[in-house]
Amino acid sequence: MTIKKYALILLLCLIFSGTILHSTSGKSLSLDLTWSSLTPADTSYKKIYGESMLYPEIILAYRLYKRFLVYAGYGFLQDRGEVPPSSAEVESDQDYISIGFGYEFPLIKKMDVRISGGIVFINYNSVNYFDSENSGIDEGNRAGYKFDIGCYYHLSRTIALNAVVGYFHGQNTTDYLRKLSYGGLKLGIGFGFRF
């Protein structure tokens, strides 16, 4: 079973359990869908895949007490590039599952700010296509950290527009003792839903 399937099962379980908690306690749930421009943390990664990448993410949050909340999220990166100077084609697939805590407070009328942070679990898989008969695969898992600051403008009691800036990072040391960084700085927009 791939990590994407695990992430989907995790989110479905959280939605189900959160719905039960919501119905019994009256505390609120929120679901955020964001599309971010990610600037990779790794310099070599930028040279191969470019200065920015699309990073979609879904986050489910549950308000524990007053303005304090707990969240779980899933995001992914998929791209193709070329390794200079050989121009060998490479393909990267990264999945990010995050869990953590947050604090949300009103800023002005119809606008809230959320500050959150936690742990991110990274699953990476990259394939190097050197020629038709020779290819290399690098795959594994790492843990890292994540911080976000989001701003929500409420269109109604259940729907909001959101803008987020965040940074997440994990690191791996290769067989050649080179450190690879995963994640980076993200700037995104999206929608938030309250239940």
Image (cartoon, rainbow, N blue to C red):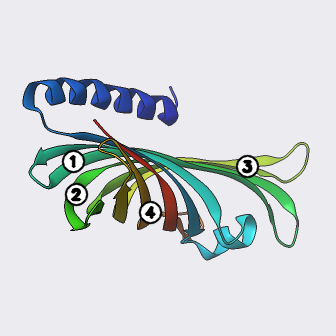
Relative to 104, residue 156 above or below: above
Q: Amino acid at mark 4?
A: Ala
Mark 1 and mark 4: span between their CA atoms?
19 Å
Vertical comparison of 68 with 115: above or below: above
Question: Would residue 91 be found to the left or right of residue 117 on screen?
Answer: right
Q: Which amino acid type corresponds to the residue marked 3 in the rendered image?
A: Gly
Task: Check disc 2 and report its element: helix, strand or loop.
Answer: strand
Q: Nearer the viewer, residue 38 or 172?
A: 38
- Label 4: which residue? 163
Q: Which residue is mark 1?
A: 70
The residue carrying pointer 2 sits among few (fewer than 14), some (14 to 19) or many (20 or more) residues within 10 Å by Cα, namely: many
Q: Is residue 183 above or below residue 20?
A: below
Earlier along the polypeptide chain: callout 3 or callout 4? 3
Q: Which residue is mark 3?
A: 136
Q: Single out the mark in the foreground, 2 or 4.
A: 4
Q: Are marks 3 and 4 in contact (CB under 8 Å)?
A: no
Which residue is pictured at 85% across the width and 54% down the height? 130
Q: Nearer the viewer, residue 84 or 14?
A: 14
Between label 3 and label 2, give the one nearer the viewer: 2
